[in-house]
Amino acid sequence: MQLLKWFQVGLLTGTLAVSLGSVGVLSQSVQAQESQVSITSTKSSGFRLLDAKTSEQSVDTRNTMYYFTINLPKDAPPLERITILQVGGRNLIEYNKDRIGTFVNRQRGQQVPLKEIKIDPKSQEVTVVFARPLQPGQIVTVNIGPFENPQTDGNYLFSVKAFPQGDTNGQLVGYARLRFVR
């Protein structure tokens, strides 16, 4: 009987040690993932997503506009293009290419000439390519007009990447969340 108790305690201790070891491994894994994410999102350029908003939060609304504002620090390289990709939400939002543009320093009258606007037909990723790379020390806003807001309410998440001149991989500058309501 006492041998059985020792055996049960031994099993419990062994299971607890294995569990704690797994927690330690899991903890190290999560720390490594967090570390990778922070390295990705703070890559040395200093580009940063400042703000994201919509002109209308109601679902199914037409003629709305989404604004994504990015800081280009004085010590950053010239900016060649920006991509915005919806990475979360219950409906995929479709965009009207004729309602996409950019402006600088939060002044809608200071439109930035674009060389190209692309929308991926499957993912609806929007790419804006500047006619001339944007010089550092400015704030740039990309405005995107959807055909209509999503039909389902909730939070919609967007990944925003900046591509300095000559950079083919781009740099994650942040995630934006737009909330739509009934």
Image (tube, grey):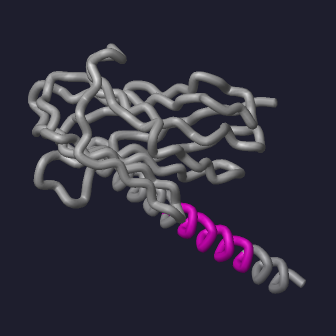
Residue nearest the observer in this picture, 151 or 99: 99
Residue 23 colored in magenta in the image: yes
Q: Is residue 57 magenta?
A: no
Write the residue at 76% across / 83% down.
7
Residue at (52% x, 36% y) in the render: 145
Q: Is residue 106 above or below residue 150?
A: above
Residue 103, position as x, y percentages in the image? 31, 25
Q: Nearer the viewer, residue 128 or 47?
A: 128
Q: How many marks?
A: 0
Instruction: Specify the quadrant of the image occupied by residue 31.
Output: bottom left
Q: Which secondary structure type mostly characterizes the magenta part of the structure?
A: helix
Where does the image place residue 77, in percent across and percent down from the top left? Answer: 10, 39
Q: Position of residue 130 (x, y in %)?
A: 22, 41
Q: Nearer the viewer, residue 48 or 53?
A: 53
* Quarter occupied by the N terminus: bottom right
**Residue farthest front in this picture:** 98
- Please give left or right for residue 12 compared with residue 102 in the image: right
Say which quadrant the C terminus sits in. top right
Q: Residue at x 33, y 41 (%)?
A: 173
The boundaries of the magenta stretch are: 10-24
